[in-house]
Image (cartoon, rainbow, N blue to C red):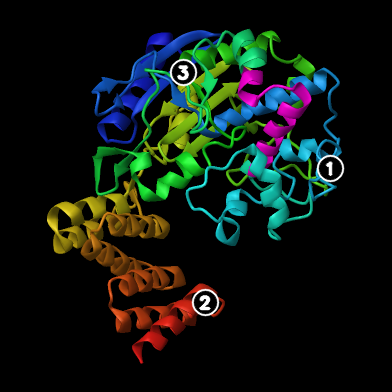
């Protein structure tokens, strides 16, 4: 495609997303290192009224894992480790002798995610966890190894924290210092660094992380002001390796080019990283969306070339770093607001660059319903929802999203609206035990015991293994006597 056509197609896509409050950040698209499209949308700082621009830096979320992979593979090239080395060889106190470095890199170690910091092992709900807390937490949790190493693919931030710990031990440098010296500087990434609640880094260009109000998506609030996001942003945000790299679109393009030029790793090492990992069965380590996973990179073959990429997502972070290694195409999308559909939008941008048509994006009927409920009341919102349900070409309706939005309303003290959402969800999805379970939970919180009992009884009838529901029901019945 001609450059002007590419620019127009991409601009139409991202301008429309921004107008619909579905994108707030920066996008850059390049081919052979030449920028085809670069644009900024929305606010980096709402209070300071600073707009996103070329200089804005963003927390990359799990795109950071590609840098952790580069660091480990650099140490491999220096002879400090082998991919089939067992992690216990470097950390004798580690409890699972079978797990290899390769399995940690490919998410096939069998380790669970951050659940090791939940429940009885978390003494202080506001304790900030660091790399040194990983192995003790793994040892203390009998759920830590979910599957036999190599048996299946299972995304584990815990494993990437262990890899950062390994980099520190073998290099003798703090992880943030290692990346700066051996990755950022050689790649020419002058505005990239690691920061966390325990590693402050002054940067007036760093975008503030925001959540939007689900019932008013044009309203943004910082994630550290939202109770449920405190854990992600602060408590777990100091575990570097899985996340915590801050960068810009321009710096990520420099990173992309440094990978091609051999400044960071040899070509044969990158080929290894971009090859799907194999399970014990000999099958590829497949991910849920149809791609596979290598050593720190997602892999997706397409008719336009092989994509090696990574996404990132957390409170106030939605990122995508996509590389078509056959055509040297690069798509970088960085958002400082939690817009959950942006990963598919980034992949759509890849197809637009290659002249393909993309399906018209369906809108969430759940979100539109909740907005209408908040603005216009229950009757108008219900009528609107019935209309959207019949328009399946333009809208989709998701039970889990309705559930999430109901809890979000309750979290903001809008209990009447929250109960209405949960009630409607049971009517929309009457075969789902979870809709009744969640409705029962909010009814219980609202002091409506008998109604909560009815909902829990229905949830348990649909799912007799619902132990949480059984416990809540027993407590409700005991308190009613």
Q: What predominant SS class does the magenta segment belong to?
A: helix
Is the residue 280 above or below the residue 35 in the image? below
* Quarter assignment of residue 38: top left
* Quarter assignment of residue 276: top right
Residue 226, given in percent of the width and then of the height, sits at: 35, 46
Residue 171 in the magenta stretch? The answer is yes
What secondary structure is marked by label 1?
Answer: loop
> Taking the image as drawn, is residue 466 in sight?
no
Instruction: Write the residue at 53% across / 42% down.
Output: 128
Instruction: Write the residue at 49% across / 80% down.
Output: 470
Circle 1 residues within 10 Å: few <14, some 14–19, many ≥20: few
CB atoms at circles 1 and 3 under 8 Å apart? no
Q: Which residues are magenta?
A: 158-179
What secondary structure is marked by label 3?
Answer: loop
What separation in Å lies between label 3 and label 2 (alpha carbons)?
Answer: 47 Å
Circle 3 residues within 10 Å: few <14, some 14–19, many ≥20: many
Q: Which mark is residue 92?
A: 1
What separation in Å lies between label 2 and label 1 (alpha carbons)?
Answer: 43 Å
Residue 205 in the magenta stretch? The answer is no
Left or right: where 370 falls relative to 186 = left
What secondary structure is marked by label 2?
Answer: loop
Task: Identify residue for label 3.
Answer: 248
Is the residue 63 above or below the residue 475 in the image? above
Is the residue 17 above or below the residue 265 in the image? below
Residue 124, given in percent of the width and then of the height, sits at: 51, 53
Task: Identify residue for label 2.
Answer: 463
* Quarter assignment of residue 403: bottom left
Decide which of 401, 439 is in the foreground and name it: 439
Left or right: where 448 falls relative to 335 = left
Q: Earlier in the sequence, mark 3 or mark 2?
A: 3
């Amino acid at each position: 495609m001609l450059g002007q056509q590419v620019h127009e197609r991409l601009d139409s896509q991202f301008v429309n997303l921004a107008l619909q409050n579905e994108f707030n950040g920066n996008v850059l698209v390049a081919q052979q290192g030449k920028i085809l499209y670069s644009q900024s949308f929305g606010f980096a700082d709402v209070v300071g009224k600073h707009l996103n621009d070329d200089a804005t830096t963003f927390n990359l979320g799990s795109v950071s894992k590609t840098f952790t992979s580069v660091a480990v593979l650099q140490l491999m090239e220096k002879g400090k480790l082998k991919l089939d080395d067992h992690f216990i060889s470097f950390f004798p106190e580690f409890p699972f002798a079978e797990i290899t470095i390769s399995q940690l890199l490919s998410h096939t170690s069998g380790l669970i995610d951050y659940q090791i910091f939940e429940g009885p092992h978390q003494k202080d709900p506001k304790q900030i966890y660091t790399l040194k807390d990983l192995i003790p937490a793994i040892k203390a949790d009998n759920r830590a190894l979910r599957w036999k190493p190599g048996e299946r693919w299972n995304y584990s931030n815990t494993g990437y924290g262990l890899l950062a710990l390994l980099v520190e031990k073998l290099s003798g440098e703090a992880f943030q210092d290692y990346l700066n010296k051996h990755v950022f500087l050689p790649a020419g990434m002058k505005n990239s660094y690691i920061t966390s609640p325990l590693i402050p880094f002054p940067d007036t260009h760093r975008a503030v992380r925001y959540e939007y109000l689900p019932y008013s998506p044009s309203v943004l609030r910082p994630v550290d002001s939202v109770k449920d996001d405190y854990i992600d942003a602060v408590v777990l945000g100091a575990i570097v390796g899985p996340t915590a790299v801050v960068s810009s679109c321009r710096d990520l393009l420099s990173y992309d080019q440094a990978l091609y030029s051999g400044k960071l790793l040899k070509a044969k090492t990158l080929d290894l990283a971009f090859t799907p990992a194999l399970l014990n069965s000999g099958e590829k380590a497949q991910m849920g969306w149809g791609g596979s996973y290598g050593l720190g990179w997602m892999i997706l073959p397409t008719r336009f070339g092989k994509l090696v990429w990574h996404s990132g997502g957390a409170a106030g972070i939605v990122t995508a770093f996509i590389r078509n290694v056959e055509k040297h195409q690069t798509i970088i999308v960085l958002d400082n607001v939690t817009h959950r559909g942006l990963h598919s939008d980034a992949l759509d941008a890849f197809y637009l660059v290659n002249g393909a048509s993309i399906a018209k994006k369906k809108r969430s009927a759940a979100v539109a319903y909740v907005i209408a409920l908040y603005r216009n009341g229950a009757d108008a919102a219900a009528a609107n929802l019935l209309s959207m349900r019949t328009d399946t070409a333009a809208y989709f309706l998701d039970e889990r999203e309705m559930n999430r939005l109901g809890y979000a309303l309750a979290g903001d003290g809008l209990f009447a609206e929250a109960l209405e959402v949960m009630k409607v969800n049971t009517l929309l999805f009457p075969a789902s035990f979870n809709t009744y379970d969640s409705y029962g939970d909010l009814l219980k919180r609202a002091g409506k015991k008998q109604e909560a009992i009815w909902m829990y009884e229905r949830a348990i009838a649909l799912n007799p293994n619902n132990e949480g529901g059984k416990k809540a029901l027993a407590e409700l019945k005991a308190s009613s006597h």
